[in-house]
Amino acid sequence: MVSQCFRHSPRALLAAAVLAAAIASCADEQEHSYVANVSDPLATPTMSTTNVSTLISDSGYTRYHITAQQWNIYDDIPDPMWKFPKGLNLVNFDLEMKPAAAMRCDSATYFSQRRLWRLDGNIVMVNVQRDTFLTEQLYWDQNQCKVYSDSFIHIVRTNHIIEGYGFESNQEMTQYNVNRPTAIIPVDRSEKGGKGQRPFGPGMTAVAQDSLPSGTPRPERPLPPERASRRRNVFGGIGTIEPGDPAGLSSATKTRTPIKR
């Protein structure tokens, strides 16, 4: 009886078609919706992806190689950001596509409009001169092309270990300053075992230990990540650190598709 009514009533057929389209539209919206809580954009990222390995370009140049287990993008908030809650490996290239610095950390946040990185937890950085930097929190301001931190810093150079609080550097990590050094330890790497001390070298400035105010406490040295004690393969998953290819990216740059911002 119902089928006969629809077959002989154009109005009924039209109403049924409109109703079916509306139901299908609602079902489709529910299946593909990516916003779980519109009232709190921080609760749900605009986009989330896992097992990331990609190159990122800036101002027409490929500048970064990123690998991360999870990458969340929050675009619908006043201060848009990227979050890497499960750790980040990052390599910075110069304009000639040569690795200038490499770093890894437990978590990271990038404020895209301000072009500011904040790295947190077990941070390990290596520059092209193979100096190693260990700290717990670090900021990287791309607008000012500088890296800085107020946290405890442990720097391993060829002939010296420097420890202190507060740190500022260019983004290649080659011209840097320790604001409040608490220890400058000569490291003898010669075969004779003598304790020869060489100057800090270009780019490094620090205050000698005996110039500090009396009673300045020596901070406890933070425990570096297990892989930080080895110069080779510090950035596991990117490659070994070798002269001429400090981040081991000679093969990685051939297969990645850049993301332009």
Image (cartoon, rainbow, N blue to C red):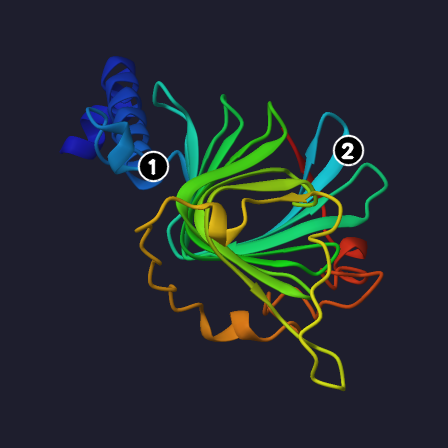
- Quarter of the rendering containing residue 21: top left
Measured Cα–Cα span from mark 1 to mark 2: 32 Å
* Callout 1–callout 2 Cβ contact below 8 Å: no
Residue receiving disc 2:
61
Residue receiving disc 1:
34
Nearer the camera: disc 1 or disc 2? 2
The quarter of the image holding the C terminus is: top right
Q: Which residue sits at x=38%, y=22%?
A: 79
Q: Position of residue 247 (x, y in %)?
A: 71, 60
Q: Is residue 220 above or below residue 71?
A: below
Query: Residue type at mark 2?
Result: Tyr
Which of the two residues, 138 or 215, is positioned nearer the viewer here? 215
Q: For mark 1, does the 10 Å Cα neighbourhood hold few (<14), some (14 to 19), or many (20 or more) residues? A: few
Secondary structure under tag 1 reads loop
Which of the two residues, 158 or 78, is positioned nearer the viewer here? 158
Residue 70 visible in the picture: no
Mark 1 and mark 2 lie on one chain; the one further toward the N terminus is 1
Residue 213 visible in the picture: yes
Q: Position of residue 14 (x, y in %)?
A: 30, 17
Query: Residue type at mark 1?
Result: Tyr
Side of 247 relative to 1 (left or right): right
Q: Is residue 41 above or below residue 71?
A: above
Q: Which residue sits at x=59%, y=32%?
A: 146
Q: Position of residue 16 (x, y in %)?
A: 25, 24
Which of the two residues, 107 or 209, is positioned nearer the viewer here? 209
Which of the two residues, 254 or 191, is positioned nearer the viewer here? 191
Circle number at residue 223: none
Q: Which residue sits at x=42%, y=31%?
A: 81
